[in-house]
Image (cartoon, helix red, strand yellow):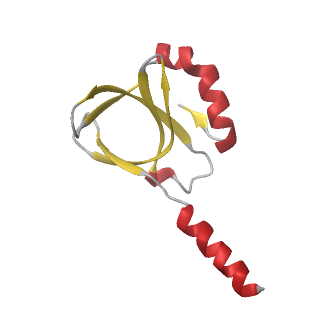
Amino acid sequence: MNENLNDDLDLMDDEIEIESIVMTDEDGNDVEYMIIDEFEQNGTNYLVMIRMEDIDSDEVEAVIFKEVEATNDEFVYEEISEEEYNALEEILKQRLDEFDIEAK
């Protein structure tokens, strides 16, 4: 029985996939983020992410980026404005509730 349990646990580990992305900030520094959610609203794609360096912190804040340009193999994202956040607030609260993360 323990062998089957271990096999099941190994299978679960194989299914957990952390998707990360490296973005360049306005100062030219590379910042690695973990993508915790992505969604589309009114024709715009959004990424909800946390900084990899903050992943073990007790108080993690999510950062929301929107896609502003896409070519064949490159995507350009920018952080959403306060007005955009206010417009998406209810959707974000519902989506982030399961992660216990506060949107920034």
Label count reads: 0
Task: Say if 17 sits above or below 6 in the image.
Answer: above
Q: Position of residue 40 (x, y in %)?
A: 48, 26
Q: Is residue 78 above or below residue 23?
A: above
Task: Please tell me which residue lies in front, 78 or 19.
Answer: 19
Determine the residue positioned at 60% across, 21% down. Answer: 89
Q: Position of residue 86 (x, y in %)?
A: 55, 15
Residue drawn at the location 45% of the way across and 54% of the way down: 53
Residue depicted at 71% across the width and 81% down the height: 4
Image coordinates for residue 51, horizontal then vertical, percent = 45, 47
Relative image position of residue 42 (x, y in whole percent): 47, 16
- Which image quarter is the N terminus in? bottom right
Residue drawn where x is 66% and y is 73% of the image = 9
Among the 4 quarters of the image, the one containing residue 27: top left
Q: Is residue 13 left or right of residue 68?
A: right
In the rendered view, would you say 59 is above or below 48? below
Q: Is residue 83 left or right of residue 103?
A: left
Question: Is 91 positioned to the left or the right of 24 in the image?
Answer: right
Quarter of the image where one finds residue 46: top left
Does residue 35 appear to the left or right of 8 in the view shown? Answer: left
